[in-house]
Image (spheres, rainbow, N blue to C red):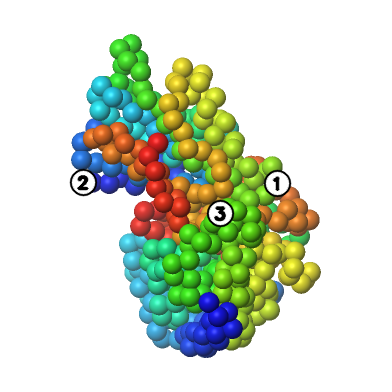
Amino acid sequence: MNKKLVNKEIMIAIKSAPLLSPSVYDIIRKIAEPDHSLADVVKIVKHDSALTARLLRVVNSAAFATLDPVNSVDRAISLLGERMVVGLAISESTGNLFHKPLEGYDGKKGDLWSHDLIVAYATRKIAGLAKINIDPELAFTGGLLHDIGKAIISDFLKGTAEELLQSIDKGHVDDYASAEKNFLGVNHQAVGYELAMNWNLPESIQQMILHHHSPAESDDEFKPYVYAVHLGDIISMMSGFGTGTDIMQYNLDQGYEEYFNLKFESIASVMLEIKDKCKRVIGVEDCM
Amino acid sequence: MSGTFLGIGDYAVSNEADSVLKTYLGSCVAVILLDPITRTVGMVHIALPDSSLDPSKKELLPGYFADSGIAVLFNKMKEYGFSEKSHKLIVKLVGGASVMSQCDVFNIGLRNVEAAKSILKSMGLHISSEDVGEKYSRSVAIEVDTGKVTVSSPGRGQWDI
Ligand SMILES: [Fe+2]
Ligand SMILES: [Fe+2]
């Protein structure tokens, strides 16, 4: 296969991906600011009537089972929490991007979004175990977006799964991302990073996307966040939440020890968090 | 054919001939008990080796841990007519994949497999076949009618154990 040509096609696919709506973009930027408040998020949502309607619909749905109907944005957001608002906003505004089946990974419809949500919750939980202060909401958002490159690259990987897995098993490459790169000249992290730049996302989130399988290569300033996503991703896959054929085909970078003091019990607590969130919040069919 | 899907920490027992028990495993381990006389099949999806890790969870979700999970499944098999006095169960073990790393803390797959094996041994239950460890995740499906246990892994095909 001509790698250059595919690369060009991938660039076109990135350019033609849906754009984030202005309010979603504002919410993500806001959350990346260290001293933001929930009120800032409420203000943005109030200016977007479609998003407001969507949030009210979710908060009044059976899953949240409030006694009285919720009619105000303020109340809805305080019930849902900042992280749910981000999640719903991203999922709503990007059309099919997070929800299409990842054929290149033999993934089912919905796999990418449930993996992203699980990783987001796991990353948030891990942020709480850091030796230094990490903003849990920013970590959550990074987790949500970390694999977005797969939505683009998947179409170019159709029918490659067996070959890519074999190249790992035979030791020709050391993980699935390297196998992707060997085949296409680019991996899902790099494609996600291009998309994140196109979307003008904050640098912290760009780094979480680009380096979630190679955290040691990220800028020092963002390393704690990148390692948090790295760990959240690995633990989610250990719990059975992947996106298809690449599940558990990535290396764990032990450099996390500089930022996180993880004992066996802490990993267990993240797995318990995954179980908890899965049934209550995410409502995945075939919920693990 | 009706399928029952087991999430993390779930367990199920069935003697309905047309049903299938299924689950999906990363570092988790499935302990499968087959009673050839009553044609009953049981499976528990274990996430962690020991319930002392979170005793409150043990009450709520005994299947989550190897010790409480195997005990609860074994008792359920008895409710379905299994009798220790008359015959033996067929025991199969699947899962416990390991993460690509040298890091000991993350080797939960191995710990789960070891815990399950030592508990089964202490109960006098002999494992007749297993597909454990390695670095890939697995799906398991058990046909209640035939007791056939099929394992598959994304991109790696499927096989019976
Ligand atoms: Fe990834
Ligand atoms: Fe991932």
Residue placed under numbered mark 2 in the picture: B1
Residue placed under numbered mark 3 in the picture: A248
Secondary structure under tag 2 reads: loop
Secondary structure under tag 1 reads: loop
Query: Distance of mark 2 from mark 1, alpha carbons?
Result: 43 Å
The residue type indicated by label 3 comes to Met
Residue A254 position within the rendered picture, expressed as x and y whole percent measured from the top left: 73, 53
Query: Distance of mark 1 from mark 3, alpha carbons?
Result: 14 Å
Residue placed under numbered mark 1 in the picture: B102
Secondary structure under tag 3 reads: loop
Residues at discs 1 and 3 in contact (Cβ within 8 Å): no
Residue A84 position within the rendered picture, expressed as x and y whole percent measured from the top left: 49, 68
Residue B30 horizontal side relative to residue A34, left or right: left
Q: Residue furthest top?
A: B85
Residue in the foreground of this view, choosing between B152 and B53: B152
- Vertical side of B51 occupied by B152: above or below: below
Residue B148 horizontal side relative to residue A144, left or right: left
Residue in the foreground of this view, choosing between A20 and B19: B19
Residue A136 horizontal side relative to residue A83, left or right: right
